[in-house]
Image: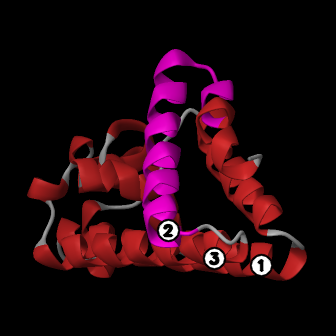
Amino acid sequence: MTDTRTRILDLAEDFTQTKGFNNFSYLDLAAEIGVKNSSIHYYFKAKADLALALVERIRETHNEACKSFSHRLATPQERLGALIDHFKCYIRDKKICMCGMMAAEFETVSPEVRMALALYFRDMRTWISQQFVQMNDPNPEDRALQFLSALEGSVLLARLEADPMIVDRSLDIFVNH
């Protein structure tokens, strides 16, 4: 059985991805999980602590996914395609990238969460840039920034328009050319 802390993080991640970090409370979490509000505070004294734990967890998860892509897949194009597919799961689940959502709420999160978000996006850009280096792109850092921007933006549009193909159409130029 999943421990209470993990259940809180799982539900808070789901809430963040579907309605935004600022649109749920500890009472919402407690009611859904079936625990007292004080149980949520036991694990996360303040909502900023919960936000930081969420960003750190998704950063670790995505870093592990990227390492897995690097080990399993032979070409940078295949690895970038796997990252695209990973993000397309958000649309299937009617969600968006949690760090993308929190970045949109940047002004309302703590400085520690802002730093963690910056590290998450730095890690993503670094890994993506490495793929473009292997593709002999003359400006891998710029291409990584363009790719990540297109990825995050296309997930938002695909969710809005209920069309996962928007992601493929937005990123095809990076992977297939």
Would you call the spot at circle 1 few (<14 residues within 10 Å), some (14-19), or many (20 or more)?
some
Q: Does residue 159 belong to the magenta stretch?
A: yes
The image quadrant that residue 92 belongs to is top right
Dot 1 corresponds to which residue?
70
Q: Nearer the viewer, residue 62 or 147?
A: 147
Residue type at the position of mark 3: Val
**Circle 2: residue type:** Asn
Circle 2 Cα neighbour tier, 10 Å, few/some/many (<14 / 14–19 / ≥20): few
Marked residue nearer the N-terminal end (1 or 3): 1
Residue in the picture at 33% in, 79% down: 43
Q: Is residue 8 visible?
A: no
Q: Is 165 drawn above or below residue 150 in the view shown? A: above
Mark 2 and mark 1 in contact? Answer it, CB < 8 Å.
Answer: no
Inspect this view and state whether residue 72 appears: yes
**Where the N terminus falls, by quadrant?**
bottom right
Residue 170's x, y, as percent? Answer: 58, 35
Q: Earlier in the sequence, mark 2 or mark 3?
A: 3
Q: Position of residue 51 (x, y in %)?
A: 29, 67
In the picture as drawn, the residue positioned furthest to the top comes out as: 161
Inter-mark Cα distance, 2 to 3: 8 Å
The segment highlighted magenta reads: 138-167
What residue does disc 3 label?
A: 133
Examine the image and state in which quarter residue 119 appears. Answer: bottom left
Question: Separation of disc 1 and disc 3 at Cα?
Answer: 13 Å
Residue 33 place in picture, x, y as percent: 47, 54
Q: Residues within 10 Å of mark 3 (few under 14, many from 20)?
A: some
Assign a secondary structure to mark 3.
helix
Q: Residue at x 50, y 68 (%)?
A: 139
> Residue 139's mark?
2
Q: Nearer the viewer, residue 89 or 3?
A: 89
Which residue is at a point 82% across and 60% down the rendered structure image? 78
Check disc 2 and report its element: helix, strand or loop.
loop
